[in-house]
Image (cartoon, rainbow, N blue to C red):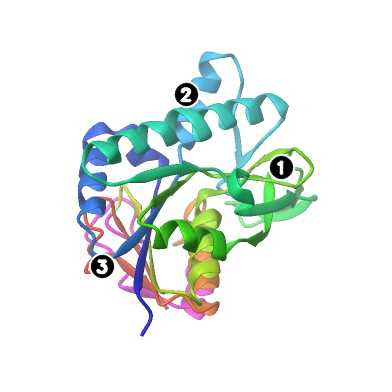
């Protein structure tokens, strides 16, 4: 029987809120068995970019990353956010190690080509996302070496192309990629945690959690406008993880990562 591994992805809104982040890290530390954390930090990057006079642009829930923004996200994700989370985990007894995809060559990517994107109004446009990485591979063996030695990896949403270039990579994609790379070694549960109790049919009503989502129901929700924007890549990554052999994928509130709440993707 495979050992269990829980992978938790925490979004930028939770990272920005000290109370929510404290609760998340406390609950994460209490998870039994092996574990790994993937974090975002987009809201922090947006704030710091604005303070530097750099405008942020989001299309279809994903960040457009020009050269200036790449410098910002590298500093914020790989430095400020990652190391603060590592330090806080160490303070509560979790032997964490902060990583980007470039460290140990754990996640390699290529710069995204022009991509057709479905907009919130239902139209499709060709978009140049700039210095954004689409993942080519993840090294599950090297991550497993760390995990099996008692280390808890904390992964920032940055990858590299093998030619000396850092690329900004969607944090949900990072979490899904890591989960898929480790699915043949562990019984993996992937939890996407954020500031809502799950995927909502009515964004204004926290009691409207959709209990389960399948590939077919997701397509219908998008067509009906129930699911849009930043939730789309999150669910797309969840579905890909399940289809690649990840045991369970759950989208839930940051304070409820015990596997018993939220939306189950199947």
Determine the CA span between mark 2 and mark 1.
20 Å
Q: Which of marks 2 and 3 is nearer the N terminus?
A: 2
How many marks the image carries: the answer is 3
Point out residue 230 in the picture as x, y percentages from the top left corner.
50, 50
Residue sitting at x 24%, y 51%? 29
Secondary structure category for the residue under label 2:
helix
**Viewer-closest of 242 and 186:** 186
Residue for badge 1: 129
Residue sitting at x 61%, y 23%? 55
* 2 or 3: mark nearer the eye: 3
Determine the CA span between mark 2 and mark 3.
32 Å
Q: Is residue 84 magenta?
A: no
Residue for badge 3: 259
Secondary structure category for the residue under label 1:
loop
219 w.r.t. 201: above or below: below
Q: Answer yes or no: do the residues labelled 2 and 3 have beta carbons within 8 Å?
A: no
Q: What stretch is highlighted in magenta?
A: 197-223
Q: Which residue appears farthest toward the front when viewing the image?
A: 149
Label 3: few (<14), some (14–19) or many (≥20) C-alpha neighbours in 10 Å: some
Point out residue 59 in the picture as x, y percentages from the top left corner.
62, 44
Q: Which of marks 1 and 3 is nearer the N terminus?
A: 1
Among the 4 quarters of the image, the one containing residue 252: bottom left
Numbered label attached to residue 170: none
**Viewer-closest of 69 and 164:** 164
**Viewer-closest of 32 and 168:** 32
Q: Which residue appears farthest toward the top when viewing the image?
A: 52
Q: Which residue appears farthest toward the bottom when viewing the image?
A: 1
**Viewer-closest of 224 and 105:** 105
Looking at the rendered image, the quarter that the N terminus falls into is bottom left
Residue 153 relative to residue 195: left or right: right
Among the 4 quarters of the image, the one containing residue 129: top right
Residue 50 relative to residue 247: left or right: right
């Amino acid at each position: 029987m495979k050992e269990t591994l829980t992978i938790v992805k925490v979004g930028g809104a939770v990272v920005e809120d000290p109370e929510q982040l404290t609760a998340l890290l406390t609950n994460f530390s209490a998870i039994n068995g092996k574990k790994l954390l993937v974090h975002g930090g987009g809201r922090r990057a947006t704030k710091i970019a604005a303070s530097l006079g750099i405008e942020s642009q989001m299309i279809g829930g994903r960040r457009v990353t020009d050269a200036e923004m790449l410098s910002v996200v590298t500093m914020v994700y790989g430095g400020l956010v990652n190391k603060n989370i590592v330090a806080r985990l160490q303070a509560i007894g979790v032997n964490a190690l902060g990583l980007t995809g470039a460290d140990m060559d754990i996640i390699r990517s290529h710069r995204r080509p022009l991509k057709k994107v479905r907009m919130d109004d239902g139209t499709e446009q060709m978009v140049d996302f700039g210095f954004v990485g689409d993942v080519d591979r993840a090294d599950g063996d090297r991550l497993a070496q760390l995990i099996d030695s008692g280390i808890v990896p904390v992964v920032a949403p940055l990858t590299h192309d093998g030619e000396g270039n850092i690329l900004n990579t969607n944090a949900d994609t990072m979490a899904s990629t890591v989960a898929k790379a480790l699915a043949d070694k562990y019984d993996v549960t992937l939890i996407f945690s954020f500031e809502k109790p799950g995927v909502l049919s009515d964004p204004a009503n926290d009691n409207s959690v959709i209990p389960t989502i399948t590939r077919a129901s997701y397509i219908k929700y998008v067509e009906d406008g129930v699911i849009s924007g930043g939730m789309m890549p999150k669910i797309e990554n969840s579905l890909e993880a399940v289809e690649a052999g990840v045991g369970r994928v759950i989208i839930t509130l940051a304070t409820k990562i015990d596997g018993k709440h939220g939306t189950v993707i199947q």
